[in-house]
Image (spheres, helix red, strand yellow):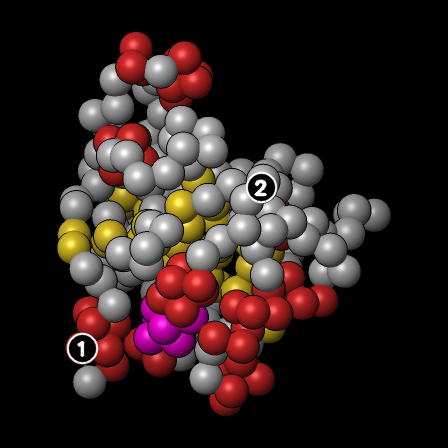
Amino acid sequence: MVVEELERWVDRRVASPNCDDRPPGTVIRLVVLHAISLPPEVFGGDAVERLFTNTLDPATHPSFASLEGLRVSAHYFIRRDGETIEFVPPQRRAWHAGLSWWEGRERCNDFSVGIELEGSDRQPFTPAQYERTGALVAALIRRYPGIDAIAGHCHISPGRKTDPGPFFDWYRFASSLPAPLAARSRIAGLFSGRFLPRPLS
């Protein structure tokens, strides 16, 4: 039943080669929320899908030059209208976090699920995205009960990443979760004091 619930929130699947197996015995404990737009501040195209499938032509936009040869992915990508694409099944390791740590543990890709939201640091997210993100995260928590925290990329890579950024409303996201799940989950954006974490001492 919990597997079927997770499947319910996926509209289509596009297989990314940028993934591998998690270390043996790994328990998934964290959901990481990201934001991405390619080109920057442009929504609705296929550039993110191409990036995650290694088919993005760096010559098609000046901002793509720095992405040449980059091998990244996320488990899920949620578009502005709420459409959700699965690039990597959650039992596998997607390459979304990069250099990262959470509660003293490095290599967050090993034990997290990455969700990319179509967005940026400069624009609000849509109601459809909050609704779908909440539903998807709730389904993930039910499928993987070891998940006890939700963080932004900014929280696991402080100083290096800022997403999902200042326009992501963590309180609105928390309210989109069923109350029992919200109560048992540590949502980093609610206790970090800002959309960015406090500086590490």
Residue type for callout 1: Glu
Determine whether the residue tagged by mark 2 lies in a helix, strand or loop: loop
Q: Position of residue 65 (x, y in %)?
A: 39, 13
The residue at the far right in this view is 201
Who's the residue at 24% across and 53% down the image? 86
Q: Where is mark 1, residue-wise? A: 4
Residue closer to the observer: 77 or 42: 42
Who's the residue at 36% across and 25% down the image? 70
Determine whether the residue tagged by mark 1 lies in a helix, strand or loop: helix
Residue closer to the observer: 79 or 5: 79
Viewed as shown, does residue 87 lie left or right of 61? left
Q: Where is mark 2, residue-wise? A: 121
Q: Position of residue 164 (x, y in %)?
A: 54, 49
The span shown in magenta is: 134-140
Q: Main secondary structure of the magenta part?
A: helix
Viewed as shown, does residue 1 lie left or right of 140? left
Whether the magenta-drawn stretch holds residue 154 is answered as: no
Residue 157 appearing in the image: no
